[in-house]
Amino acid sequence: PLATQGVSIYRPIIYGNTATVLSQKEREALPSPDHTHRWTVAVRSAASGENADQVGGADDLSYFIKRVTFKLHDTYPNPSRNVDKPPFEVSETGWGEFDIHIRITFVPESGEKAVVVYHHLKLHPWTASGEPEIPPLDVAVKAGPVHSWQYDEIVFHDPYQNFLNILTSH
Ligand code: SLL
């Protein structure tokens, strides 16, 4: 395929998680009642555009992203979770924070290597003192959902002409 020369093009994304404390009732209904939180980890578009008013504009990404693999902590069954269509996200319950390895694979026409980013799953609210202590659950419930998101840009240097056309026609 034809390569471009001296072209760099980027696509803005956000990745990260939201987390909420489970109610006592929800916990009792789970197969693992030691789980305290429900969380969602996701890769979303940070671009403004037609879909920007939708949650996260999540639909924007599939024209250049083929698959997102979220590698969870080994305490989870099938920890390597492949998501092949938007929304590129995984929802789970659990009790602990850990590093999630997020592998982004691009459409085959791109010829681009996969990109890996890391996200530390955040369940517990930040405290004013900045102490790493885990607040009691009733304090966490009052603090509301936790959001931890990172902005990033995926940069393609000298993309194939075909792929550049795909990127710019969106
Ligand atoms: C910790 N390093 O010790 C971390 C590990 C593991 C989190 C956290 C659920 C797993 C299951 C879960 O929350 N794992 O369903 O057994 O804090």
Image (cartoon, rainbow, N blue to C red):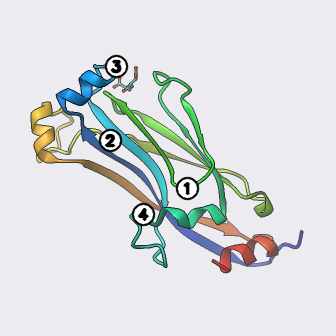
Answer with mark 3 or mark 4, whichever residue precedes in sequence: 3
Residue 99's spot in the image, x, y percent? 44, 36
Q: Disc 2 and disc 1: Cα gap in Å? A: 22 Å
Label 4, on which residue?
56
Answer with mark 1 or mark 3, whichever residue precedes in sequence: 3
Q: Quadrant of residue 62?
A: bottom right
Judge: label 1 CB < 8 Å from ligand 1. no
- Indicate which label's residue lies in the foreground, 2 or 1: 1
Judge: label 3 CB < 8 Å from ligand 1. yes
Q: Disc 3 and disc 4: Cα gap in Å? A: 30 Å
Residue 54 is labelled as none
Label 1, on which residue?
86
Question: Judging from the image, what secondary structure is the residue with disc 2 in?
Answer: loop
Q: Disc 2 and disc 3: Cα gap in Å? A: 20 Å
Q: Is residue 41 above or below residue 6?
A: above
Badge 4: residue crowd in 10 Å (few <14, some 14–19, many ≥20): some
Answer with mark 4 or mark 2, whichever residue precedes in sequence: 4
Viewer can see residue 75: yes
Residue 61's spot in the image, x, y percent? 58, 63
Question: Judging from the image, what secondary structure is the residue with disc 1 in?
Answer: loop
Labelled pair 2, 1 in contact (Cβ < 8 Å): no
Answer with mark 2 or mark 3, whichever residue precedes in sequence: 3
Label 3, on which residue?
32
Q: Amino acid at mark 2?
A: Lys
Q: Amino acid at mark 4?
A: Gly
Q: Disc 4 and disc 1: Cα gap in Å? A: 11 Å
Residue 122 is labelled as 2
Labelled pair 1, 3 in contact (Cβ < 8 Å): no
Q: Disc 4 and disc 2: Cα gap in Å? A: 19 Å
* Residue at 47% from the left image edge and 28% from the top image edge: 73
Answer with mark 2 or mark 1, whichever residue precedes in sequence: 1
